[in-house]
Image (cartoon, helix red, strand yellow):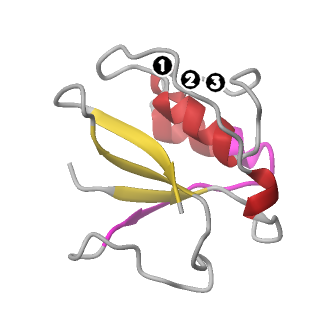
């Protein structure tokens, strides 16, 4: 799978003030809650309460994530990394902005996400 980047912080927010540290609690291969924990962290939450496990959503993680964020006037942008494995800089993604980075899990042949800058 290709690494991807997802930005969820509203443009006016200062990421330094928003980032939390919420850890994954379900390590089930292919259906754990790393995405739930990453979204909670990027949004400055202190725990998983109120953030669904998008991977378990019957409509699929991407549709569930988009709908949940839209209810909060936020959005989900899926962006591929360039051939050097880097995120292209744009006004919408300034240096140091928080994001969710996807790659292969260190625990098997399935995806995994972490918070990045």
User: Quick one: 109 or 70, which is closer to the camera?
Assistant: 109
Up-down relation of residue 2 to residue 111 (above or below): below
* Residue located at (73% from left, 61% from top): 15
Asked if the stretch drawn in magenta spans residue 73, the answer is: yes
Q: Quadrant of residue 46?
A: top right
Query: Is residue 80 visible in this depiction of the protein?
Result: yes
In this view, the residue in front, 41 or 60, is 41
Tell me the crowding category of disc 3: few under 14, some 14 to 19, or many 20 or more residues within 10 angstroms, Cα based: some
* Range shown magenta: 67-81
Dot 2: what SS?
A: loop
Q: Mark 1, residues whose alpha carbon is within 10 Å: few (<14), some, or many (≥20)?
A: some
Q: Check whether the beta carbons of the residues at disc 1 and disc 2 lie within 8 A of each other.
A: yes
Q: Are marks 3 and 2 in contact (CB under 8 Å)?
A: yes
Q: Residue at x 76, y 36 (%)?
A: 45
Q: Which mark is residue 52?
A: 3
Report whether residue 67 is seen: no
Q: Position of residue 80 (x, y in %)?
A: 34, 66
Q: Are marks 3 and 1 in contact (CB under 8 Å)?
A: yes
Residue in view at x 54 percent, y 63 percent:
117
Please provide percent x and percent y for residue 14.
Answer: 80, 66
SS category of the residue bearing label 3? loop
Residue 53 — which label?
Answer: 2
Instruction: Using residue 9 as the reference point, say whether residue 81 is left or right of it.
Output: left
């Amino acid at each position: 799978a290709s690494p991807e980047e997802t930005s969820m912080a509203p443009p006016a927010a200062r990421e330094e003030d928003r980032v939390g540290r919420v850890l994954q609690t379900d390590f089930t291969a292919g259906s754990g809650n790393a995405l739930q924990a990453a979204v909670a962290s990027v949004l400055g939450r202190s725990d998983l309460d109120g953030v669904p496990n998008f991977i378990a959503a019957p409509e699929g993680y991407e549709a569930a994530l988009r709908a949940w964020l839209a209810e909060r006037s936020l959005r989900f942008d899926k962006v591929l990394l360039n051939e050097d494995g880097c995120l292209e800089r744009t006004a919408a993604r300034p240096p140091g902005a928080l994001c969710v980075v996807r790659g292969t899990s260190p625990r098997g042949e399935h995806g995994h996400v972490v918070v990045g800058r």
